[in-house]
Amino acid sequence: MESRMKQKKSGKSYIRNRNAITLIALIITIIVLLILAGVTIRLIIGNEGLIEKAQKTGTAYSEQEAREKLEIALADLRIGKYSDSSYNSGEYINKNLEKQEMTVIGDIVIVNDWKFEIDRSVPKIGNSLGKGSQNDNIKISTETKIREDYVNANILANIEYEGTIIEIIIKGQVIEVPEKIDGAYVINKEITENGIYTIYAKDENGNYKIAKVEVTDITEDMDIWNRQDMENFRDKVNSGRTFEGKTARVMADIDLEGSEENKWVPIGTDTISFKGIFDGKYNSIKNLYINEENKKNQALFGCVEGGIIKSTILNDVNITNTKRI
């Protein structure tokens, strides 16, 4: 009897011990699961988690889809620019984009709620503006400085804003955001071509401000078709445009109508030299008349330094000059 009692007690003790071990194992398992669940939750909903990454991927895809839709529409418009006599950069573009359920507000086109700035002169997409709104608290002031020889220029932009600017784009090119000094971001952008330059500044909330600068004074390649064009070319050089790195092309035979009344003033002066390329393309320049007895360097070109004159034919030249030519 006593032996049976001991066995019963021993059995109960075993069960209690086994239950305790099972409970401890369960607690440990729960703790491990909670830890794993915590890691999983962080992976799913935390910063840079799966959900956030998926949202970003979806957003990027949505914007790219809208951009591609607009790019296709603008490609069709570029074809229309050369094939449709009714084409213009205003209403023609607006109507064609609106037919494709796009909203046009000035140079901003809205596609599936995404905003894009367009360059109507091409036409093409200039900047992607996201889904933000224009922020008039961002102030952009600009100044253009042309180099003395008119070869290039600098656009100086002063962007004033109490908040933080996170992105700056000038004519499609991303500009490194400079350090903010006295409440303003100062940009100095060198340019080598004329045109309309759009300055786009976006803040930390995705809102933006746009400003435009038109540059027209940089020297460009030039085609010369007649006496008037030749005189315009000469006047540009003599006023300081050296044409360095640029080309002037004679596109047809030119009559300078030589006479005392129409006597020729040379291209280039004692202080301003022509430094570009003058390509006569084997066209004839005739009736060059000069009668300046007391002036030097009297010819079609007065002063050339580092420039090239090629394929140029002169006919019926009449120069009276007692100093060296």
Image: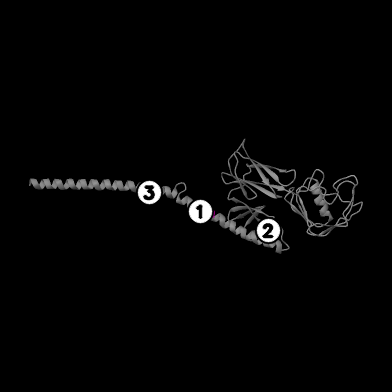
The label shown at residue 261 is: none
Q: Is residue 155 visible?
A: yes
Residue visible at 40% across and 49% down in the picture: 40
The label shown at residue 57 is: 1
Instruction: Give the image location of residue 136, x and y in percent.
Output: 64, 43
- Please give the range of residues in magenta: 56-60
Residue 58 is a magenta residue: yes
Label 2 to label 3: alpha-carbon separation: 55 Å
Residue visible at 33% across and 46% down in the picture: 31
Check disc 2: other Cα within 10 Å, few if <14, some if 14-19, many if 20+: many
Residue placed furthest toward the right: 260
Check disc 3: other Cα within 10 Å, few if <14, some if 14-19, many if 20+: few
The label shown at residue 93 is: 2
Q: Secondary structure at mark 3?
A: helix
Q: Which residue position holds label 3? A: 37
Instruction: Give the image location of residue 207, x and y in percent.
Output: 59, 46
Which kind of residue does numbered mark 1 sit on? Thr
Dominant SS in magenta: helix
Q: Is 138 on the left or on the right of 257, as rendered?
A: left
